[in-house]
Amino acid sequence: MTVTAPLVEKPRIVRPGPRFTSGDIACAEGALAAGCRFFAGYPITPATEIAEHMSRRLPEIGGVYIQMEDEIASMAAVIGASYAGVKAMTATSGPGFSLMQENIGLAVMTETPCVLVNVMRGGPSTGQPTMPGQQDVMQARWGSHGDYEIIALAPSSVQEMFDLTVDAFNLAETYRVPTFVLADEIVGHMWERVTIPEAESIRIVNRKKPRESPSPEFAPFKPDADLVPPMAVFGQGYHFHATGLTHDERGYPRTESVEVQTRLVQRLCNKIRQNRDKIIRVQGSMLEDAEVAVVAYGIAARAALSAVKKARAEGIKAGLLRLVTLWPFPDEHVGQVAKRVKAIVVPEMNCGQIVREVERASKETPVTFLSKLGEEPHKPDEILEAMRGTLK
Amino acid sequence: MIEEELRHPYDKFLRRDRIPHIWCEGCGNGIILNCFARALDELDMDLDKVAVVSGIGCIGRISGYTNTDSFHTTHGRPIAFATGVKLANPDLTVAVISGDGDLFAIGGNHFIHAARRNLDIKVICANNFIYGMTGGQGGPTTPMETWTTTTPYGNIEQAFNLVHLAAACGAVYVARWTTLQTRWLTESIKKALQKEGFSFVEIISECPEIFGRYNKMDTALKMMNWFKEASVVEHFSDPAKAEITPNRIVVGEFVDIEKPSYGRLLKEMREKASQKKTGE
């Protein structure tokens, strides 16, 4: 006799089709589409709308929204939920991102799949809460103590707030690593037309599960060939231990062993580094014959594309390399573009962060940096003027 | 002939490959681990459904020794981590076992808010009056006029009265015992494990190695004698009047009330919300 599981109609969590919405709402919907069922956060401009939307949507579909006492607790709760087997996220901005750094390190060390959205505003400190910024990109890479690798994506549009949030969950689950969506106030608050794909066409990745049954010998941190260990979760009988201390494959503290420390920390870095090709995404426009290239990300890439089109109209052979992945940094892609062009322009809404990476990857090719702070993003004409300047 | 290895009846509650533990001779943490195991045993708890979460400090290592799913968090954050675990999988009994410095100095904010929400977790605090792991510094529970490595002239800070704090924040079960009263302590841990809502058990624990040496009680026996002489059992007395002094340690149950837990209210809210379906 064949036993067939009853056909259960998959509930349609996110309505497909076109709509007019904001970046923060699109981000929340992307998370739901990716399978996120736990949100812990703390109100902060300009990311609050993500929490508000989640507080309404998650209870409807059996999920959990909880407003924690601060961002330290939010990040800790997200790690707890992920270890209980639920896809989890938080969303914040600069000051909250600073508080989360402690437990971002814990998520790295305990290889916790989770997503953290930082809708960047003007810093340092309380800075300009309602103004855009791209000042936290280095903090995203290096903010917690110790050596590690993370993944960070930079959406440029409301559509990408949806798409890249889905991608962020997939990457977090694939590599068991905290993954950041580094948005900015403009992308977060902007309203645009987006198209939500049909549920079946949204690629969803879930973490690898242990292939063996619970046993006293179970090693929760024993990696596969891709350097990522399958993930046991609480409540399934594995009786495993996880700790922020340096630990062996059993999860047991090994604070005395140079060998265990070296093997663990190198693996935490290498599981991202050796999979760079699979992780990194960039988008090139008009680069084939370009003599000057703009390298940009987030909201700055929107003005950059407009500037490149204007330049082309004047006969300047301009192109754009848009960085979708910021971390791990797309060295090879930037290096290849740098070899072909005479000059590179980097517009950023900070005092020069990603430009340092671009300079490093560009070797001899001169790089012009265009800083912008405050309310407005770069104007296309400002970027165009910088391009003209490089060709004089 | 069948040879049977001699095993302690509570071995099944321990990760045997992690023993011996790191705690000093005479430390109260072993007693706490013993009472916790006893409570699990007497309640016949399904160990697959118990999660032990701890923070940083001497007692923080306990999660590494219990044969359950366990997590050793960053300093002060076990309650916040446990919040995520419990809400994501309500079937689990989540016990936070950590120290006074971890739970009430760096982690104090998480304690008061988890108690306020009546989150269904069990918080067991080993209070040894100092930061043991870092060598015996004073902290939020160090009694006035006692000596530690950072209060060389005697402590001038008021100490937290933890049972008063827990009761004021809304905990549904609050008890305090010393490591001397193991039977009562075990009963209180059992009550906490069974109770729905935020339950708190404070355990006054001896650290003869540091707190004791600095305060003329340099053996476990001397500290136990202090607990014996100073302990006063006063069930359901006013927790506000339960401050710990050299002459008086009020022990007993302070709070045992019924109140819907956060998890229960969340479930009810979800049922309401799922009828609504506002969509995006």
Image (cartoon, grey):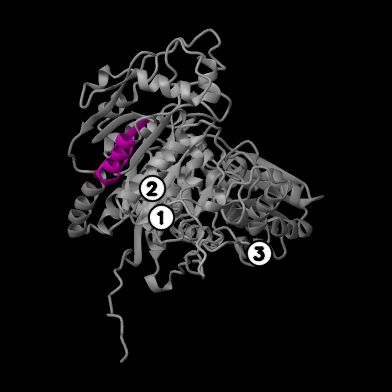
Task: Report the amino acid beneath label 2.
Answer: Gly
Mark 1 → mark 3, Cα distance in angstroms: 31 Å
Instruction: Name the front one of labels 1 and 3.
Output: 1
Q: Which residue is mark 3?
A: A277
Task: Report the amino acid beneath label 3.
Answer: Asp
| Callout 1 secondary element | loop
Q: Which residue is mark 2?
A: B84
The stretch drawn in magenta includes residue A173: no
Left or right of A221 on screen, residue A60: left
Which of A204 and A369 lies nearest the eye of the viewer?
A204
Q: Which residue is mark 1?
A: A84
- Is residue A190 placed above or below B101 in the rendered structure? below
Which of A386 and A111 lies nearest the eye of the viewer?
A111
Give me the chain letter of mark 2.
B
- Is the C-beta separation of discs 1 and 2 under 8 Å? yes
Res. A310 in view: yes
Q: Residue at the location (28% across, 75% down)? A: A9
Q: Residue at the location (31% across, 54% down)? A: B44
User: On the same chain: label 1 and label 2?
Assistant: no
Task: Measuring from the top left, give residue A156's x and y in whole percent.
Answer: 51, 53
Res. A376 in view: no
| Callout 2 secondary element | helix
The part of the chain drawn in magenta is B183-203
Task: Measuring from the top left, give residue A258's x and y in whole percent.
Answer: 72, 46
- Is the C-beta separation of discs 3 and 2 under 8 Å? no
| Callout 3 secondary element | helix
Circle nearer the N terminus (1, 3): 1
Left or right of B243 on screen, residue A139: right
Task: Report the amino acid beneath label 1.
Answer: Ala
